[in-house]
Image (cartoon, rainbow, N blue to C red):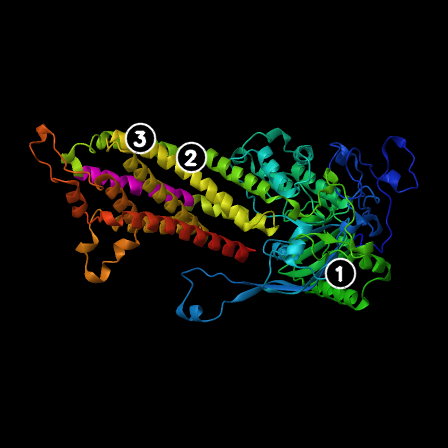
């Protein structure tokens, strides 16, 4: 299906400039690609001036004038990749979220109330179409787009057909790309770096580096980001953030493109660029469905077909040229001094009366189309469409072949050029993915002002404080209690910084992971392995650097084994705090996650073994200190510093024999530390780290699956 109106008569493009005579052939009316672009396999932007030279057909007040031509064969998207989507009788209900003060005992026991967001919606879009979904807020635009893109997997009824057949969510994600409504970026990266990471994730391993670089440069030129390419995302305007979202998701355009409100927070000029770029993609053979919340009359000349929604109902479907006549036929006459798009939104908001007549008209049109069945003119196209999702046995995951091809062999394509950008995502090497994700985590943490700069400031501050407050407490045994306090504060501080930093940064990283996992850019295990490796290296750096300074500035025993295990327990408690923070951040959002993290930390400090021991508790709660991970680190560090036959503790002469402890064994006995359990403490912390990381990984996978 070439477009929503393929059965209609197509009109030539706009007149050619400079008085040139119009040729009769189609090729003379369409731009010709140059360089590496467009050998019949992909849509590329090889010529930076190409988009401005393209003359798209403009509506002339009739249905025929709104028909859209696509690029001729060989200069656009390959025929076997072009996609048609059709949706029939789509209805969706969403739960009504009530405030906590509105809930009563009866409402908690009754089923959750739901409201209808989309009601009996039908439509279609084909190659070359730029379909726009319009409507006032809360009319069901984004809900319908989520259903079509596969993001909404439950709570709706009806069918969505891709190329005339049902397609799984995984297959659909490999043939489509979606620009979300929210702008999700890692703010520490620049605009160019963000696009480069997107190119590394979405292009196959076989693509050359120069092709990825060319795609990044063309994306910045196409979306007007060249002037801000070196600026961090956190410092660019909302307009550029929105354009960056579009450029990032469409840097490797798939045959089916979903865009949710690209003109939000965008001025009129940039909105014009957005629609013109999307129109160019449709011209090259892509199927583009876009939600627009603030349409203008200028945008209508790029749109092939409109779907106008009001309260979940379809009140208009057709070409923009017939919009004024359709509204006038039902008594809605647009004043001459009011834009048709502004008047349309006012009608959809019921400012001029009810919409029952418009909704009934669209329902009757949908029934007539359903009863008429497919058009004979579209039969050859539907025959082609049935051969898109055939999977060859023994092939790699995600590899598809053409069922109409002889012998079931995949068509031959160039592997080392930008023309093969639709190669299966499964061809991206896992080592390259791990390296890319690991580098992204490393630079994200390194450039973050909270997770790196503030963490360095805190470490240096604590080193200075410990060096002055606890100076020489390791050798002056009349200050043994202060040395024990230093050990406990050091372990607690290392745990607190790791716990809170992981709790804060995990929710934001999960939002990116959910969106990227939606299109299977990488595996969950690779993502989590890269995250764990990055966190471990940073905790190793922080714990060892601060531990060495604190150990020597407090004049602890200069024995290699004691130094090693002091650093080892500091590293273990830091990594365990990072793992617990990741688990909490995976389950909860920012506010609740911070509260839970503080609660866990305070609990671990209280039962850490410094304030009281398990022997001082009642019998039925003696087990509580054994649930505190700080207790194991504190007990093991005490054994490393005061165990292993350290001997008598001598006081300085000026202390006048005021040492509270005669031997190191007395110190361990006072704090109920059994030096024979040293290796048990070491193993328990190691097992706890592995267990919490596994729990965090499973929680992450569950949350991604639940959000998808």
Return the x and y of residue 348 as percentages of the image width and height: 65, 56
Query: What is the span of residues highlighted in magenta in the rendered image?
Result: 481-502
| Magenta stretch: dominant secondary structure | helix
- Is 253 inside the magenta-drawn segment? no
- Mark 3 lies on a secondary structure that is helix
Residue 609 percent across, percent down from the top left:
23, 49
Is residue 538 or residue 2 the one in the foreground?
Answer: 538
Circle 1: element type: loop
Q: Is residue 556 above or below residue 425?
A: above
**Residue 144, position as x, y percentages in the image:** 64, 57
| Whether residue 609 is visible | no
- Distance of mark 1 from mark 3, alpha carbons? 68 Å
- Quarter of the figure that contains the N terminus: bottom right
Q: Earlier in the sequence, mark 1 or mark 3?
A: 1
Q: Residues within 10 Å of mark 2 (few under 14, many from 20)?
A: some
The residue that appears at 50% across and 57% down in the rendered structure is 702
Q: Which residue is mark 2?
A: 452
List the residue tagged with mark 1: 164
Please report whichever mark, 2 or 3, sits nearer to the chain's N-terminal start. Answer: 2
Element marked by disc 2: helix
Instruction: Tell me if residue 509 comes above or below residue 395 in the rendering.
Output: above
Pointers 2 and 3 in contact (CB under 8 A)?
A: no
Q: Quadrant of residue 480?
A: top left
The answer to the question of whether label 1 and label 2 lie on touching residues, with beta carbons closer than 8 A, is: no
Mark 3 = which residue? 549
User: Is 486 part of what is drawn in magenta?
Assistant: yes
């Amino acid at each position: 299906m070439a477009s929503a109106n393929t059965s209609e008569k197509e009109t030539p493009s706009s007149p050619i400039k400079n008085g040139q005579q119009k040729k009769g052939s189609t090729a003379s009316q369409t731009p010709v690609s140059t360089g590496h672009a467009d050998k019949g396999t992909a849509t590329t932007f090889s010529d930076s001036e190409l988009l401005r030279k393209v003359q798209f057909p403009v509506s002339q007040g009739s249905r025929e004038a709104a028909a859209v031509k696509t690029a001729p064969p060989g200069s656009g998207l390959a025929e076997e990749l072009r996609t048609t989507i059709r949706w029939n009788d789509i209805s969706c209900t969403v739960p009504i979220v009530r405030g906590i003060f509105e809930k009563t005992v009866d409402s908690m026991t009754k089923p959750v109330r739901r409201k209808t967001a989309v009601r009996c919606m039908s439509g279609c879009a084909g190659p070359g179409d730029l379909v726009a979904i319009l409507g006032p807020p809360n009319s069901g635009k984004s809900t319908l787009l989520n259903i079509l893109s596969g993001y909404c997997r439950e709570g709706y009824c009806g069918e969505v057909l891709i190329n005339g057949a049902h397609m799984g969510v995984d297959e659909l994600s490999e043939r489509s790309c979606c620009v979300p409504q929210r702008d999700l970026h890692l703010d520490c990266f620049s605009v160019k770096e963000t696009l480069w990471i997107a190119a590394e994730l979405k292009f196959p391993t076989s693509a050359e580096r120069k092709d990825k670089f060319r795609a990044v440069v063309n994306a910045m030129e196409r979306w007007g980001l060249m002037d801000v390419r070196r600026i961090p995302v956190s410092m660019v305007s909302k307009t550029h953030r929105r354009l960056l979202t579009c450029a990032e998701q469409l840097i490797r355009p798939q045959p089916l493109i979903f865009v949710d409100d690209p003109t939000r927070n965008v001025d009129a000029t940039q909105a014009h660029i957005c629609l013109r770029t999307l129109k160019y993609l449709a011209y090259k053979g892509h199927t583009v469905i876009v939600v627009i919340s603030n349409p203008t009359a200028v945008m209508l000349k790029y749109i092939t077909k409109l779907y106008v929604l009001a309260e979940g109902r379809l009140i208009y479907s057709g070409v923009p040229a017939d919009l004024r006549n359709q509204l006038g036929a039902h008594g809605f006459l647009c004043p001459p001094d009011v834009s048709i798009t502004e008047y349309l939104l006012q009608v959809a908001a019921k400012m001029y009366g009810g919409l029952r007549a418009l909704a009934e008209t669209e329902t009757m049109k949908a029934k007539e189309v359903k009863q008429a069945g497919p058009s004979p003119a579209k039969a050859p196209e539907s025959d082609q469409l049935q051969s898109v999702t055939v999977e060859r046995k023994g092939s790699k995951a995600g590899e598809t072949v053409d069922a109409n091809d002889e012998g079931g062999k995949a068509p031959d394509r160039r592997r080392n050029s930008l023309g093969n950008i639709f190669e299966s995502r499964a061809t991206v090497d896992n080592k390259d993915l791990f390296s890319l994700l690991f580098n992204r985590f490393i630079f994200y943490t390194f450039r973050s002002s909270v997770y790196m700069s503030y963490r360095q400031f805190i470490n240096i501050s604590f080193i200075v404080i410990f060096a002055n407050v606890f100076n020489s407490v390791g050798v002056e045994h009349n200050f043994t209690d202060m040395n024990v306090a230093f050990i406990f504060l050091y372990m607690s501080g290392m745990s607190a910084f790791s716990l809170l930093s992981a709790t804060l940064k995990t929710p934001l990283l999960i939002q990116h992971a959910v969106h990227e996992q939606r299109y299977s850019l990488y595996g969950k295990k690779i993502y989590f392995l890269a995250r764990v490796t990055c966190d471990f290296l940073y905790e190793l750096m922080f714990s060892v650097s601060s531990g060495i300074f604190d150990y020597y500035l407090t004049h602890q025993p200069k024995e290699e084994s004691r130094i090693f295990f002091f650093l080892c327990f500091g590293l273990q408690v830091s990594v365990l705090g990072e793992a617990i923070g990741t688990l909490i951040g995976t389950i909860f959002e920012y506010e609740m996650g911070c509260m839970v993290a503080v609660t866990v930390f305070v609990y671990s400090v209280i039962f850490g073994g410094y304030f009281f021991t398990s022997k001082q508790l009642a019998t039925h709660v003696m087990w509580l200190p054994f649930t505190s991970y700080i207790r194991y680190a504190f007990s093991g560090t005490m054994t490393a510093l005061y165990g292993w036959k350290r001997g008598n503790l001598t006081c300085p002469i000026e202390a006048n024999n005021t040492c509270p402890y005669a031997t190191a064994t007395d110190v361990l006995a006072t704090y109920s530390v059994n030096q024979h359990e040293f290796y048990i403490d070491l193993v328990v912390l190691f097992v706890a780290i592995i267990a919490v990381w596994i729990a965090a990984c499973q929680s992450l996978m569950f949350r991604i699956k639940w959000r998808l």
